[in-house]
Image: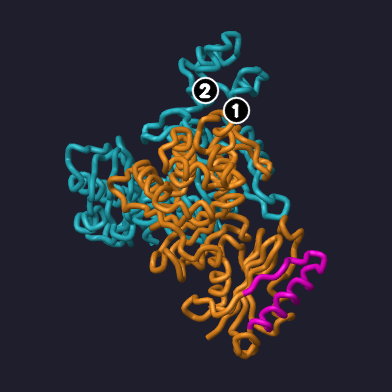
Chain colours: A orange, B cyan
Amino acid sequence: MVYAGVDVGGTSIKIGLVDSNGNIIADNSIETDKSRGYKGILDDIVADIKVLCEKTGIDYHSIAGIGMGLPGVVDSRTGTVSYSANLGWRDVPVVHGLEVASGLRAEAANDANCAAWGEYKFGSSRGMDSVILITLGTGVGSGIIIEGKLFDGVSSAGGEAGHMIIVKDGKQCNCGLKGCWERYASATALIEQTQEAMAKHPESLMNKIAEEQGKVSGRTAFIAAEQGDKAGKEVVSDYIDYLATGLINLGNIFHPNAIIIGGGVSNEGPALIAPLEEKVNSSLLANEHNPKVRIIKASLGNKAGLIGAAALVM
Amino acid sequence: MVYAGVDVGGTSIKIGLVDSNGNIIADNSIETDKSRGYKGILDDIVADIKVLCEKTGIDYHSIAGIGMGLPGVVDSRTGTVSYSANLGWRDVPVVHGLEVASGLRAEAANDANCAAWGEYKFGSSRGMDSVILITLGTGVGSGIIIEGKLFDGVSSAGGEAGHMIIVKDGKQCNCGLKGCWERYASATALIEQTQEAMAKHPESLMNKIAEEQGKVSGRTAFIAAEQGDKAGKEVVSDYIDYLATGLINLGNIFHPNAIIIGGGVSNEGPALIAPLEEKVNSSLLANEHNPKVRIIKASLGNKAGLIGAAALVM
């Protein structure tokens, strides 16, 4: 069986043909042309799926369904995007629209949920029962799977762990709240923390590394720390501490089998994952009597959303 | 049908006979005699159920089952108390023990979960799909029901929302963490906040009220605020703000139909509930596009645990 997976972002759309084992047969990326309205965007997606079919010799009408991940509040039960700031959509009946445009069966869910579903079905947490995916990027995304089911609350309005307040009256977040986890644990926050430390410690290796790389990135402090830089080590340690705080909260609330870490920052690998796993598990309530919450690096990279979207229709 | 419900606490045990509609036919309270070990305690419970049967003329053998709520980590799937600090128990096969002692079918769950289950089946949130019960007492207890099922994570080790960190590096909590929600939002915390404000504002009405009542209680600041006392109003407003912080987090993660507030502090009624509902709903992500999270006072009082325990075997 072949399925189509679509991962819609604010600037580009990833589209792929995926087999029953979660392998990508062919994929592509197109621009998100918001000026064309939602129907135009859905037409663009269908046209691109047809291009992929031609390339691979797969009969378009043999595709078993299209799954779509979208940035925003997606009510997967009604197939409607209630609200998407990135796309400027409100109450868009996206599943119906896609079925009309494609002539195929369609499903839709929030993009972070799709990524979690992809990792759960075909990635790092395959075979586990309850897992949470945390994506460290511009913000902190989250997807929660409980006993084999995607969980996102009434009308799919929940699952927003990135906006958990961990520092009451803390830094202002775009969402209107103060002290949200993502203000301290996203890649954006890590870069901000690195820049602050660089200004405070002109002698730090971080300044040299950033100059060589032409920019401050989420990697800057990790590279410096690896080379023994004191200020770099501090940035990394503080960042991991912030990240752990939210994970401890999720651990005490959900106690999942594992928390999967995705997004660019997760590429730091063991330097990030090992201290995180230690910190989280030593902090959980009654931890000596309970199973460990494993902390695992996501394995599907930035294709998790596409693969998970396809898995919605499997 | 008649069921027995048991709510085991560290110092006393509430025991009741409950009908299929969640009404208590007769109930009682006995001492938790820890010196007798867990088997002794289970025998005491069974003996008391027999006393209640005699009193009411109900045939003991007609009881359809015994449900038991326990303070600690209860793995409801295996019927085992993994750990209870209050009872000093570790890996106690409590369901099997109770079935042997009683000759009846038994079930067990964490006490906060039982209270949530009671409110969900027969109390304030009857007929709703997903609800969270928050109990404001010595600590902050929580019970989470998602789509009609009690949720408490792998091995029932989750559901501990009271230990969500809301003030990173904040006040030391008994659990070992710092800045847990219960350090700011429990009845204990409210009393502490009241005492601090009283010391800072000797002119405040709170001092007079506490003197008249012979103690500082969770009510002191609310009574003063009601009478227009400035410092009292501040305590109430700050306390509601702390309470709201945790509820906003739960709202953004779970987006339940309702959050039920129980425990002594909930008796403040509208003075607590109304500003809380306003604050929480105006702070939730994309709140204008999503259903409201209702904040409701628990309706079963301190019998919720007993009734919910009985409902485990219904």
In the rendered structure, does residue A34 fall within the stretch colored magenta? yes
Element type where label 2 sits in the image = helix
Decide if residue B297 is in sight here.
Answer: no
**Label 2 neighbourhood size at 10 Å, few (<14), some (14-19), many (20+)?**
some
Amino acid of disc 1: Asp
In the picture of the structure, the residue carrying the numbered disc 1 is B238
Element type where label 1 sits in the image = helix
Residue at 52% from the left image edge and 49% from the top image edge: B132
Q: Quadrant of residue A308?
A: bottom right
Q: Quadrant of the N terminus of chain B?
A: bottom left
In the picture of the structure, the residue carrying the numbered disc 2 is B193
Q: Quadrant of residue A178?
A: top right
- Decide which of tag 1 and tag 2 comes sooner along the chain: 2
Amino acid of disc 2: Gln
Q: Main secondary structure of the magenta part?
A: helix
In this rendered view, identify the residue nearer to me: A235 or A88.
A235
In 3D space, how far apart are the residues under numbered discs 1 and 2 (Cα atoms)? 9 Å
In this rendered view, identify the residue nearer to me: B125 or A218.
A218
Q: What chain does badge 1 belong to?
A: B
Q: Quadrant of residue B36?
A: top left
Confirm or deny contact between disc 1 and disc 2 (CB under 8 A).
Answer: yes
Residue A21, position as x, y percentages in the image: 46, 78
